[in-house]
Image (cartoon, rainbow, N blue to C red):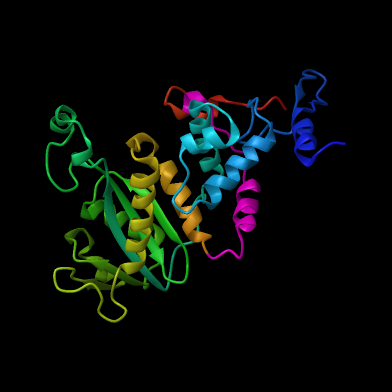
Amino acid sequence: MRTPTTALTLATQRKWQCKSAHTRRQFTVKVGTIFEDSPLGLDKWLTAVWMITNCKNGVSSYEIHRAIGVTQKTAWFMLHRVRVAMQTGSFEKKMGGQVEADETYIGGLAKNMHRDKRHARITGTGGKDKVAVMGLLERKGEVRAQVIIDATQATLHGEVKRQVEKGAELFTDGWKGYSGLHAEYLHQVIDHAEKYVDGQIHTNGIENFWSLLKRGIKGTYVSVEPYHLFRYLDEQVFRFNNRKADHDGIRFSIVTSQVAGKRLTYKALTGKLSDEDSSSPC
C-alpha cells in the first residue's frame, strides 16, 4: 500500500510530454515553479517550505540539512528558492491612514569579527560599512522593507512619496532625512532623545519589526551577505504580515500557492547569471 509520501514522490517523478510538435520534450509538475530542475522530491521540498514559513526566527540551512537529509549547500539553495515564493511582489497600492517610517542598518557585529577582518571592514562608526534598510508600517496593515542605497533625505523622501499616499499621517523619529515631508503629509516626529512615545506619535511598530528581523539574522543566520539581504527581508516581511493567521497551515498554503512562475537558478543566486537566462521546456 502506498503511503502519502510515496504517492507524492511518484507524482513528482511522473513525466508528461509537450503537445508542441517541434519539441515533444518531457517535463514534470515542477516545471515553471521554484522546484524546477531539482532532483529532490516534493516530500523534502514541502517540509522545507513548512519549516521556513512557520519558524518565527527563521530556520538555518544546517537545520534543513539535518531535518530532511540533504547537504548544507543544497539546503541553503532550497531556502533561497522558497524565499522567492515568499516575496510580496510589487507595491502597486500605496499605504494610507497612519504610517510609521524608519531606517536601520544591518551588518556584522565588530566584536564577532577576527581582529584583522575588523580593521579591514570597519572603517567608521554607526551605520558606516553596513547596509541601510528602510521600513514602512501601515498601522492595522502591512509592513514593507527594502534595501536602500543610503539614508539621505533624497532617498527617504523618494521612498515615502512612492509608497505612501499624500495626506496620510506619517510618524518618524527625529532623523534629518525625514525633514520637509510636512508639505505633503501630516508628519509628526518623536524625538527619541526625550521620549519614545507621545500618545499616538511613535515608531514602536516598525521598531518591533526591526527587532524580529535582527533576532533572526543574529540568532539563526548569524551572518548575511549584503548581496542576499533583500531575500531575508522578503522572508521576515512575509511572516510578519501573516503573523495573525489562525494556524500554520494558512501561511504554508499561501507560499505553496505562489511557487508557480518563479524560478531561481544557482548561477543567478550566486551572481553569475540573471534569472531571465532560465526558461521552461514548454
State the residue in front, 244 or 44.
44
Residue 278 coordinates in the image, percent (x, y): 58, 25
In this orientation, does residue 47 appear? yes
Q: Residue at x 39, y 53 (%)?
A: 145
Most extreme residue toward the bottom is 199
Quadrant showing the N terminus: top right
Is residue 91 something one can see in this rendering? no
**Residue 129 versus residue 162 in the image, above or below:** above
Q: Which residue: 62% across, 41% down? A: 47
Say if 158 sits above or below 187 in the image. Answer: above
Q: Does the magenta run of residues contain 267? A: yes
From the viewer's perspective, tell me whether residue 26 is left or right of residue 110. Answer: right
- Quarter holding residue 191: bottom left
Question: In x, y percent, where is residue 256?
Answer: 64, 46
Q: Residue at x 60, y 36 (%)?
A: 34
Q: Position of residue 269 (x, y in %)?
A: 46, 29
- Left or right of 170 on screen, residue 193: left
The answer to which of 282 and 226 lies nearer the viewer is 226
Residue 256 magenta-drawn?
A: yes
Q: Which residues are magenta?
A: 244-268
- The residue at the far top in this view is 22
Tag count in the figure? 0
Q: Quadrant of the C terminus?
A: top right
The residue closer to the viewer here, 13 or 96, is: 13
Task: Tell me the quarter of the picture where residue 135 sits.
Answer: bottom left
Instruction: Give how far across and how far down residue 63 sits, in percent.
Output: 49, 38
